[in-house]
Image (spheres, helix red, strand yellow):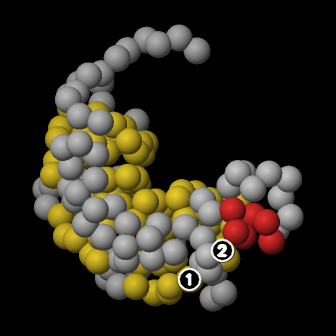
């Protein structure tokens, strides 16, 4: 690959989401989300220290680590609402049904929100572990965790390798 274009903005880029040719970039320094395409850059306010973000094209969901919340931001109007989800949310993902999954690092849990009503549907405790990142694939959500306590129980070769959990919906 060759770098063909560099888009500069002030701040610290952290999370990325791509939808229909539009790139969304979280900025942890300025607590904003940059919306980028080839013609313009739009900046909208978000929660404090956005570690991750996802979009379905109509809403941007951000994991606001230092607000202990997620924000749901309307792409057109820029209006947002905050939803308290637990301590230090570090990862966020959408599933095929439009539900929002949030990994809370300090709460050591993963919650599932209804993407329409914004209500918590489930709360999965992760004993002795701190979730750091997640990605959805088909009907599963894959979560990486930091602490080696569970890695040792899983008999991994190195206690430094992250553990990947597969959390399936029981519905």
**Which element type, helix, strand or loop, lies under badge 1?**
strand
- The residue positioned 33% from the left and 37% from the top of the image is 13
- Whichever of callouts 2 and 1 sits on the residue coming sooner in the sequence is 1
Structural crowding at the residue carrying mark 1, measured as other residues with C-alpha within 10 Å and reported as few (<14), some (14–19) or many (≥20): few
Q: Provide residue 142's location: percent of width, then percent of height.
A: 64, 63
Q: Secondary structure at mark 2?
A: strand
- Whether pointer 2 and pointer 1 mark residues with C-beta atoms closer than 8 Å, the reply is yes
Q: State left or right for residue 154 relative to residue 168.
A: right
Q: CA distance from mark 2 to mark 1?
A: 9 Å
113 with respect to 27 (left or right): right
Residue at which label 2 appears: 167
Badge 2 crowding class, 10 Å Cα cut-off, few under 14, some 14 to 19, many 20 or more, is some
- Identify the residue at horizontal 54%, vertical 57% (top origin): 133
Residue 163 at x, y = what percent? 70, 60
Name the side, left or right, on which 36 lies relative to 163.
left
**Residue 139 visible in the current orientation:** no
**Which image quarter: residue 90?**
bottom left
Q: Is residue 134 above or below residue 129?
A: above
What residue do we see at 55% from left, 67% from top?
A: 130
Instruction: Identify the residue position indicated by label 1 in the image.
Output: 124
Q: Residue at x 50, y 85 (%)?
A: 123
């Amino acid at each position: 690959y060759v770098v063909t274009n560099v888009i500069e903005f002030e701040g610290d880029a952290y999370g990325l989401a791509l939808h229909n040719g539009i790139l969304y970039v979280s900025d942890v320094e300025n607590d904003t989300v940059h919306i980028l395409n080839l013609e313009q850059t739009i900046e909208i306010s978000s929660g404090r220290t956005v570690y991750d973000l996802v979009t379905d094209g109509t809403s941007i969901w951000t994991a606001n680590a230092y607000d202990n919340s997620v924000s749901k931001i309307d792409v057109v109007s820029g209006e947002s609402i905050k939803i308290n989800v637990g301590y230090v949310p570090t990862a966020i993902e959408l599933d095929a049904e439009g539900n929002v999954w949030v990994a809370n690092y300090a709460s050591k849990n993963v919650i599932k929100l209804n993407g329409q009503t914004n209500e918590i549907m489930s709360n999965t405790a992760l004993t002795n572990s701190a979730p750091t990142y997640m990605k959805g694939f088909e009907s599963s959500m894959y979560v990486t965790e930091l602490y080696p306590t569970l890695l040792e129980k899983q008999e991994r070769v190195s206690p430094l390798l992250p553990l990947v959990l597969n959390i399936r919906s029981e519905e």
